[in-house]
Amino acid sequence: MFFIFGVNSDRKEIGSFGPVICGCCGRYGRYQVYMTYMCLSLFFIPVLKWGRKYYAETSCCQSLYELDPQAGRRLQRGEQTEIRPEELALIRRGGSSSGNAWQGWTDQPVVRYCPACGYETEEDFEYCPRCGRKLEKR
């Protein structure tokens, strides 16, 4: 008897919340909220999820915040529509703009991708966890 199992990371979109005034660029925007997690699958059926983290990305300058887990769960259940500043921790400051000219990112992570299967990750992998080929930097 043999078992087919796998572990992978996944992302689930929760929704868009706002409008808010961005703490990084000072413009109006919205928070795009999503959850990331690790998942154990047995025969391609998700069995166990762990490592849930909630993130909010601003629509104006793409600043990324980690959201308090309790606030993330409330948003996921639809109980709360307002995100308070004390529930956010800045991870990546987005570019500020003057008109349409973007001045660039600060602390932008390196994205690696697999030319064979298209897998993308910000992790420091050298080889693709899906197909085993060498990853390239984007």
Image (cartoon, rainbow, N blue to C red):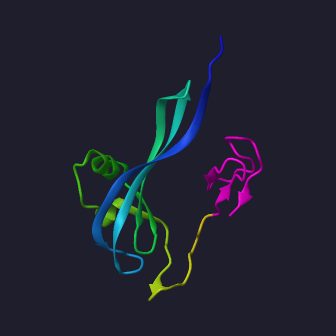
In this picture, which residue range is highlighted in magenta? 110-138
Q: x and y percent of residue 1 in the render?
A: 65, 10
28 relative position to 40: left or right: left
In the image shown, does 31 or 69 lie closer to the viewer? Answer: 31
Q: x and y percent of residue 98 in the render?
A: 45, 89
Q: Looking at the image, which residue is at 56% across and 79% down?
A: 104
Q: Looking at the image, which residue is at 49% across and 72% down?
A: 93
Q: Looking at the image, which residue is at 35% across and 80% down?
A: 27
Q: Quadrant of residue 136?
A: bottom right
Q: Looking at the image, which residue is at 62% across and 53% down?
A: 120
Q: Main secondary structure of the magenta part?
A: loop
Quarter holding the C terminus is bottom right
In the image shown, does 52 or 104 lie closer to the viewer? Answer: 104
Q: Quadrant of residue 58?
A: bottom left
Q: Is residue 35 shown above or below 18?
A: above
Task: Please identify the residue farthest to the bottom as the structure is shown.
Answer: 99
Q: Is residue 2 shown above or below 28?
A: above
Task: Please identify the residue farthest to the top as the structure is shown.
Answer: 1
The mark total stands at 0
In the image shown, does 41 or 100 lie closer to the viewer? Answer: 100
Q: x and y percent of residue 111 in the render?
A: 64, 60
Q: x and y percent of residue 38 in the render?
A: 52, 40
Residue 116 is covered by the magenta coloring: yes
Q: Quadrant of residue 7?
A: top right
112 relative position to 46: left or right: right
